[in-house]
Amino acid sequence: MASQSSFLDKVLGRIGRLDTEGLQTVVQRLARERNFLETLFNAIEDGVLVLDEQGRVIYFNHAVTQLLNWPPGEVEGRPISQFLPELDWKTIASQAAQGGPRIARHEFELSYPRQRFLRLYAAPLDVESRGGAGMALILHDETEARQKTFEAIESERLHSSLSSRPVWRTKSAIR
């Protein structure tokens, strides 16, 4: 994506000198790139959220609507704490504001719309600024992996309890 930022830098450097046709070309290219990124983000199975510096939702992909049962038109611009009260947004934001770890990891459980275990990765959008540019959140559904781990532990526990029982063998005479 380095070519995109250099493209944008070039355009911004001479935006005052662009005529109507040049400006239209730039807008069309930016629209194509936005559509490309939108398609890319919606193809990802993990939830992708973008929050502003106050913790308000400014973008989320299709996977978020599936994971959290969010209505598409009612979330943008509202605080993340309204939709994910399990998420300790104040702690995440304060870590970013203090120049904390670049990526914060949290795990939490949701009970609605169905029980899920989610792993959240939070990263500041602009690592140069201290908390002033918002955050990117990635939500990964760990429910299936946890269920498989639980089943493996239960199977091992059952297997070990069966193998620790004494086995009674009788000798039979073979004639």
Image (tube, rainbow, N blue to C red):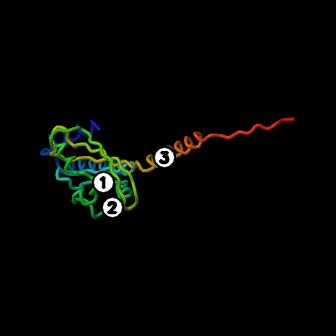
Q: Residues within 10 Å of mark 1 (few under 14, many from 20)?
A: many
Q: Are marks 1 and 2 in contact (CB under 8 Å)?
A: yes
Q: Is residue 132 left or right of residue 32?
A: left
Question: x, y percentage for residue 91?
Answer: 20, 47
Give the x, y percent position of residue 164: 57, 39
Question: Amino acid type of disc 1?
Answer: Phe
Vertical comparison of 39 with 171: above or below = below
Q: Which of pointers 3 and 2 lies earlier in the amino acid sequence?
A: 2
Question: Which amino acid type is marked by label 2?
Answer: Trp
Residue at (21, 55) in percent of width and height? 56
Classify the position of the N terminus by image quarter. top left
**Is 51 or 43 nearer to us in this picture?**
51
Q: Badge 2 is on which residue?
A: 70
The image quadrant that residue 15 belongs to is top left
Question: Residue placed at 38% from the left, 62% from the top?
Answer: 113
Q: Quadrant of residue 85?
A: bottom left
Amino acid at circle 3: Lys
Front position among marks 1 and 2: 2
Q: Which residue is mark 3?
A: 148
Residue at the location (59% across, 40% down)?
Answer: 163
Q: Nearer the viewer, residue 87 or 172?
A: 172
Where is mark 1, residue-wise?
60
The residues bearing labels 1 and 2 have C-alpha atoms spaced at a distance of 10 Å
